[in-house]
Image (cartoon, rainbow, N blue to C red):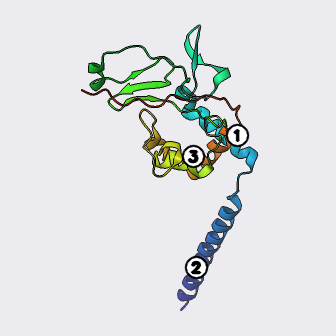
Amino acid sequence: MKKLIPTLMLVGIVLLACNSKKEKTVASTSESIEVMNAEAMIKRGEYLVNSIGCADCHSPKIMGPNGPMDDPDRFLSGAPHDLKLPAYDPKIINDFVLFDYSLNAAVGPWGTSFSANLTPDDTGIGTWTEKQFITAIKKGKYKGLEGSRDLLPPMPWHYYSNLTGEDLKSIFAYLKTIRPIENIVPSPIPPAAP
């Protein structure tokens, strides 16, 4: 009996400690959940756009002292409407993918694709809803429309689809704040017939 009472007290203390700890964890977790305000969302979107390299393909380039660099006057405006691609041998397309020096156009077995205008101009994503943007990235759909064609290579939407909904909302919020640039991107060119 002398051993039973201390053992029961010890078990009771352990159970109480376990329950108390759970309550603390739940309380501290619920306190740490915070809804991002608009300014924080935009800053996060800017961070993500710059970190994942959207400008690498979606910004036209100018030649700098060390080679091509983003043209600050056409930031994220996509492939220029008047982009001229050099001639190439269509036979090599089965073995290679070709890019223009700005990375705004790519030629491969799928044909020729051009990077989209991501600015808030009507020729870019200006008329898009947040839902369309998320559909474009999560499902790889052109203009974020369910019944539209798939986004073409080299757009790595398969990888970007792993971004969270909050990440994509932040990117969209940021893109809506950048300077709108009118630029109708060239339409894709289907592959040459064999």
Q: Which amino acid lies under the numbered mark 2 shown in the image of this protein?
A: Leu
- Tag of residue 43: 1
Extreme-top residue of the structure:
65
Question: Does residue 11 sit above or below 59 in this rendering?
Answer: below
Instruction: Identify the residue shown where x is 66% and y is 29%.
Output: 181
Between marks 2 and 3, how big is the CA–CA gap? Answer: 57 Å
Marking on residue 10: 2
The image quadrant that residue 29 belongs to is: bottom right
Which residue is tagged 3? 133
* Label 2: how many Cα within 10 Å (few below 14, some 14–19, many 20+): few
Residue at 40% across, 29% down: 189
Q: Earlier in the sequence, mark 1 or mark 2?
A: 2
C-alpha span from label 3 to label 1? 18 Å
Q: Residues within 10 Å of mark 3 (few under 14, many from 20)?
A: many
Image position, residue 138 (x, y; %): 49, 48
Between 24 and 109, which is closer to the camera in this rendering? 109
Foreground tag (2 vs 3): 3
Which of the two marks, 3 or 1, is nearer to us in this view? Answer: 3
- Please state the horizontal and vertical placement of residue 42, each as a whole percent of the image: 70, 42
Mark toward the start of the polypeptide (3 vs 1): 1
Residue type, mark 1 in image: Lys
The C terminus is located in which quarter? top left
In the image, residue 5 lies at what x, y percent? 57, 88
